Amino acid sequence: MKILANDGIDPIGKALLEKAGFVVDTETVPQDQLVEALKNYDGITVRSATKLRKELIDQVPNIKLIGRGGVGMDNIDVEYARSKGVAVVNTPAASSLSVAELVFAHLFTGIRFLQDSNRKMPVEGATKFNALKKAYAGGVELQGKTMGIIGFGRIGRETAKVALRLGMNVLAYDLYPAEGTLPLTFQGGVSVEIPFKTVSLDEVIANSDFISLHTPFADKPILGAEEFAKVKQGVGVVNCSRGGTIDEEALIAALDSGKVAFAGLDVFDNEPTPRAEILQHAKISLTPHIGAATNEAQERIGVELASLIIEHFNK
Ligand SMILES: O=C(O)[C@H](O)COP(=O)(O)O
């Protein structure tokens, strides 16, 4: 059996597949050459870069399995592939913590203006140190503030757990209202269950000091001009979910007016070429879609993907 890991796979996952007798190629084939290349494979694994659309799936009937190393499958025509008998699998839980921690990297950045000082210090730090010191005063703390979470699935809940550990309050909304407890484990294995109950989207929007999005790709933005009009003055907004869930123009307007104090963005409209106004905005902390890109998450993803592939082909 031959697998093309077109967006790469963690070496441990690759080794597990090879031990089980699979040949695994990890060299990325450009999108426009995939039809030809895939004729030599039984399965393909991707992350979010490679697109597996109907037209391609139709032309490679020899492909029996598509493995998504990660969560979002908006780059794959999943239902269509399954209707053609192709197995489609992903690793929905493996990267939750990494994404959640990136949310806080953006939050800590935003509350102390690091996105701007990291740009200005190399240029002005030696000549205008005291002016910059003054410019970046007025930071705030996270403890005691309210973290609004839109989308309370695995990643949303992991984000809530980090917020709770930091002493924040959590307000969460999900399309499917939910109630339960979140387990928090501390040093020495001490564990506590924190009760939660989701609230309405309006409540999250109106009452949060920081808002983080954790929903799948949506055709219509969840946060647009109407919603930014209702947020607390000076809210911080983080998006590590999918481009398209925030109306970027409305966000820029809200940042410029001061209604939104800062934004942390890991995902963008038009990836991989986000617009210049976003890339150059002094109030936006930027990362290039790296939510799942920690060594730990990629190892978990690779191992899980390998076991899903082995299980599928050994059935
Ligand atoms: O959906 C996901 O798992 C994340 O967006 C990560 O995407 P990536 O595998 O392309 O980094």
Image (cartoon, rainbow, N blue to C red):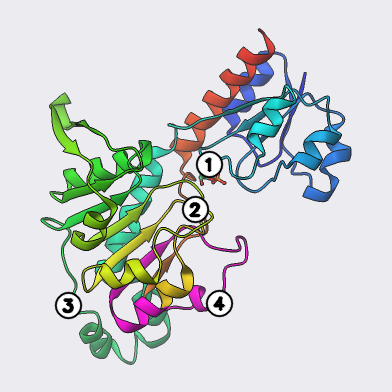
- Image quarter in which the N terminus is found: top right
Q: Secondary structure at mark 3?
A: loop
Whether label 2 touches label 3, CB < 8 Å: no
* Three-letter code, disc 2: Arg
> Which of the two discs, 1 and 3, sits closer to the camera?
1
Q: Position of residue 61 (x, y in %)?
A: 83, 27
Q: Residues within 10 Å of mark 3 (few under 14, many from 20)?
A: few
Q: Which residue is mark 2?
A: 242
Q: Position of residue 131 (x, y in %)?
A: 25, 90
Q: Which mark is residue 276?
A: 4
Residue at 60 percent of width and 46 percent of height: 48
* Three-letter code, disc 3: Gly
Q: Which residue is mark 1?
A: 72
Q: Respond yes or no on whether mark 2 lies under 8 Å from ligand 1.
A: yes
Whether label 1 touches label 2, CB < 8 Å: yes
Instruction: Inspect this view and state whether residue 106 appears.
Output: yes
> Which of the two discs, 2 and 4, sits closer to the camera?
2
Residue at 27 percent of width and 85 percent of height: 132
Q: Residues within 10 Å of mark 1 (few under 14, many from 20)?
A: some
Give the distance between the C-alpha atoms of the residues marked 2 and 4, in whole angstroms. Answer: 18 Å
Q: Which residue is mark 3?
A: 138
Q: Earlier in the sequence, mark 2 or mark 3?
A: 3
25, above or below 280, in the image? above
